[in-house]
Amino acid sequence: MNRRDFQFRLAAIGAAAASLPVAECARAAGGNAPRFLQTAVDDAVRPVLQKNAVPGMAVAVIVGGRQFFFNYGVTAPEGAQPVTADTIFEIGSLSKTFTATLASYAREIGALSFSDPASAHWSALAGSTFDRITLLELGTYSAGGLPLQFPDSVTDEAGMLAYFRDWRPAFEPGTQRVYSNPSMGLFAHLAAASLGAPFPELMEKKLFPMLGLAGSYIQVPQARMRDYAWGCSKDNRPIRVTPGVFDAPAYGVKTSARDMIRFVQLNMDGGQLPEALRRAVRGTHTGYFQVGDMTQGLGWEMYAYPTPLDRLLAGNSDQMALRAHKETRLDPPRAPRADVLIDKTGSTNGFGAYAAFVPARQTGVVLLANRNYPNRDRVTAAYRILQALESRPRGLAIAE
């Protein structure tokens, strides 16, 4: 297949996915969605698929304690396997919410304190700038200007350690938010060290099972590779994530809509979890820094609810990810609240993900796609679905 034919096929896939009736999608996922929800999801998602030539998307919605799944398109640009609620997608930086949960759990069981200096958990950092940068500052992108990505020259742990030892902050720690994969990666590395095992092992053998997530991985096993979607790159080639230093904690989780909406539900109501894990999940919603209209938690980001769409778009903009932003430390930290909208985006070169939920309304949305399409389109689609849930007629039953 030549490139022109491939691009034409992608456009056709996007159009076909957009035209697939949402009721059919819901039935294919075993759902029984009420009519208003079917219409809301279809109206929000269909234009996004067509505009961005997205090969496939899994949408999950939770409302009133019930989960609904809507699946569009196919799992690979050149394949015919339909997306299901169990299709495995790369979720990019949405992985950071799981990373933060593991670190929060380490704190709950006494393995670390967020006020610890980073060097307290890795002796090789002793005598460096990280003697005065705390775990909390790493976990909230507040260390003083660590970059979005490592330099290309950093390809292994030895290079990473040398980079950190030589690095000097551009800002006083705790004064500027600079979104950073190395910052979150080091946070995870130190949390895993406090728990005495490698990060991927802790995720796959401890955290995911404790959360009841049977289809979530750092490394997708051979037995599940058929369910692992292929992403679509900017130049319209099939692609999956490339390994890199600290890839697992920063952008390395692969999961399904079924697991991701369960994780969202547990973030709103974790009563079924073991006590330490329940506190850990809730603890990720603590507000540590205020950055404009956004409150920075651990992994998750929060906005007062109700929230205008333009505030969510600003908080999830390229500008927010690529530039330094003045922040105000919340002292004491802001306790978790129900009257907020909590969200996080995530991308790899071939995938785009978004999750948002409102604890006070017990509503949430997950969008997983095998193309990295603009955050603006993800946030807008999810917002429209949440607004439809909010404005549904009083007393309307969730099940029909």
Image: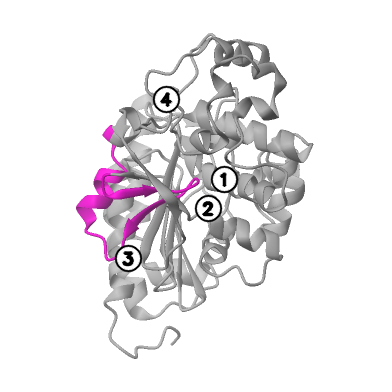
Instruction: Using the numbered discs, state the Cα–Cα distance from disc 3 to disc 4 in whole angstroms.
Output: 37 Å
Q: Residues within 10 Å of mark 4 (few under 14, many from 20)?
A: many
Q: Is residue 330 left or right of residue 269?
A: left
Residue carrying label 1: 100
Residue carrying label 3: 385
The numbered mark, 3 or 4, whose residue comes first in the sequence reads 4
On whether residue 374 falls in the magenta region, the answer is: no
Q: Quadrant of the C terminus?
A: bottom left
**Image location (x, y in percent) of residue 13:** 38, 46
Residue carrying label 2: 284
**Range of magenta residues:** 292-319
Q: Quadrant of residue 161?
A: top right
Name the kind of residue labelled 3 in the image. Ile
Mark whose residue sits in front, 1 or 3: 1
Name the kind of residue labelled 1 in the image. Ala
Kindly check if marks 1 and 4 are in contact, taking CB atoms under 8 A apart as contact. Answer: no
Name the kind of residue labelled 4 in the image. Gly
Instruction: Using the numbered discs, state the Cα–Cα distance from disc 2 to disc 1 in whole angstroms.
Output: 7 Å
Mark whose residue sits in front, 4 or 2: 4
The numbered mark, 1 or 3, whose residue comes first in the sequence reads 1
Near-viewer residue (131 or 101)? 131
